[in-house]
Amino acid sequence: MGERQPENHNIWSKTPEKTIEFMRGVKKPWIAYKVMAAGGIHPRDAFKYAYEGGADFICAGMFDFQVREDVILARDILAGSLKRQRPWQG
């Protein structure tokens, strides 16, 4: 058996469906964070997945030159047709 490698700062959840299922029953706003896994997931995919998974808000880290594009992506995703099971809480 090989030596276990350390998890790096850009690892994503290994069981996101468990978080989604748990949060489905929570009646408080959900702020999702680290949705881009330190650059491991493109904002377009990360934001959509988080909102469709039930997040009400996203706390996204970005550089100043990324703000405009990320805001446009979030706005377009929220204006589109999200496949969401959890009611908005925020």
Image: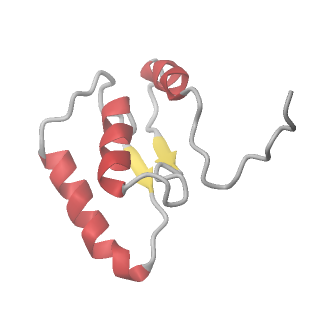
- The vertical placement of 66 against 75, above or below, is below
Q: Total of numbered circles in the picture?
A: 0
Give 55 or 14, whichever is nearer the viewer: 14
Image quarter in which the N terminus is found: top right
Give the image quarter of residue 9: bottom right
Q: Residue at x 32, y 47 (%)?
A: 45
User: Residue 10's spot in the image, x, y percent?
Assistant: 60, 53
* Residue 90 can be seen, yes or no: no
Q: Residue furthest front?
A: 1
Measuring 58% from the left and 36% from the top, which residue is drawn there? 13
Q: Position of residue 34 (x, y in %)?
A: 53, 52
Whether 24 is drawn above or below 4: the answer is: above
Say whether residue 45 is left or right of residue 73. right
Residue 84: image x %, image y %?
Answer: 26, 27
Q: Is residue 5 visible?
A: yes
Q: Nearer the viewer, residue 32 or 26?
A: 32
Q: Residue at x 30, y 65 (%)?
A: 70
Q: Is residue 67 above or below residue 8?
A: below
Residue 52 drawn at (x, y percent)? 30, 33
Find the residue positioned furthest to the left. 80
> Residue 74 sits in which quadrant?
bottom left
Residue nearest the viewer, comparing 1 with 52: 1
In the rendered view, how is the structure colored? secondary structure
User: If the image is split into quadrants, where does the C terminus sit?
Assistant: top left
Left of 76 or right of it: where is 50?
right
Q: Nearer the viewer, residue 28 or 22?
A: 22
